[in-house]
Image (cartoon, helix red, strand yellow):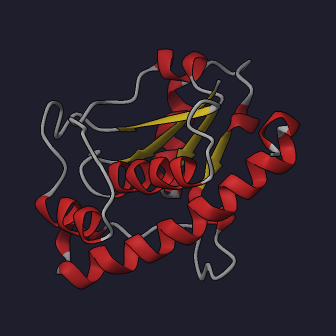
């Protein structure tokens, strides 16, 4: 089982949306028995809270499922997950600060590394924006998740069907 963790700051906007999109895509491609995902935040702002209502609105608009409560990234996550996907450089740094220097940092990636239309390294945080900002983030994450699945298929022959 390949385990993926999506990480943003508060775990109520970007990372749970990425989790929902990714899970929808792995269902669509028949990969649910091979890949699973979760999400977390680098801060403790929203532990135990549901995703932002605007995140849920976009997720439901695209008929995706999301059953998640905010949680904080821990050093144990590094050992539990094969890939840790940060939404921006700030969260990437927060993750790296928690890990021992001997850790394999190659498993930590930026989400927009998989976005061929990226104009920056960061998935913008829509928390302070309108619903339009959440829609923009959905489009970025959908492209990125699709390309990340292609990356996984290329690098994990057992996924090629």
x, y (%) of residue 3? 58, 29
Query: Which residue is more in the foreground, 46 or 26?
Result: 26
x, y (%) of residue 56? 19, 59
Query: Which residue is more in the foreground, 75 or 50?
Result: 50
Q: Residue at x 39, y 29 (%)?
A: 73
x, y (%) of residue 71? 27, 31
Placement of 48 over or under 27, stated as above or below: above
Query: Which residue is more in the foreground, 161 or 156?
Result: 161
Q: Is residue 128 left or right of residue 134?
A: left
Q: Is residue 148 left or right of residue 84?
A: right
Q: Residue at x 43, y 54 (%)?
A: 18
x, y (%) of residue 108? 64, 40
How many tags in the picture?
0
Placement of 155 over or under 96, stated as above or below: below
Quadrant of residue 119 within the rendered picture: bottom right
Q: Which quarter of the figure is the C terminus placed in?
A: top right
Q: Residue at x 65, y 24 (%)?
A: 1
């Amino acid at each position: 089982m390949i385990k993926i963790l999506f990480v943003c700051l508060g775990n109520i906007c970007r990372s749970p949306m990425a989790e929902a999109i990714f899970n929808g895509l792995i269902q669509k491609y028949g990969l649910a028995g091979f890949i699973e995902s979760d999400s977390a935040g680098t801060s403790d702002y929203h532990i135990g809270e549901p995703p932002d209502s605007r995140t849920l609105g976009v997720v439901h608009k695209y008929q995706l499922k999301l059953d998640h409560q905010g949680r904080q990234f821990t050093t144990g996550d590094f050992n539990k997950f094969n890939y840790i996907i940060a939404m921006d450089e700030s969260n990437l740094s927060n993750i790296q600060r928690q890990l021992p220097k001997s850790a394999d940092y190659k498993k930590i990636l930026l989400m927009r590394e998989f976005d061929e239309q990226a104009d920056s390294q960061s998935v913008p945080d829509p928390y302070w924006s309108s619903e339009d900002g959440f829609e923009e983030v959905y489009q970025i994450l959908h492209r990125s998740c699709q390309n990340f699945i292609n990356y996984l298929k290329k690098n994990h022959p057992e996924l090629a069907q």
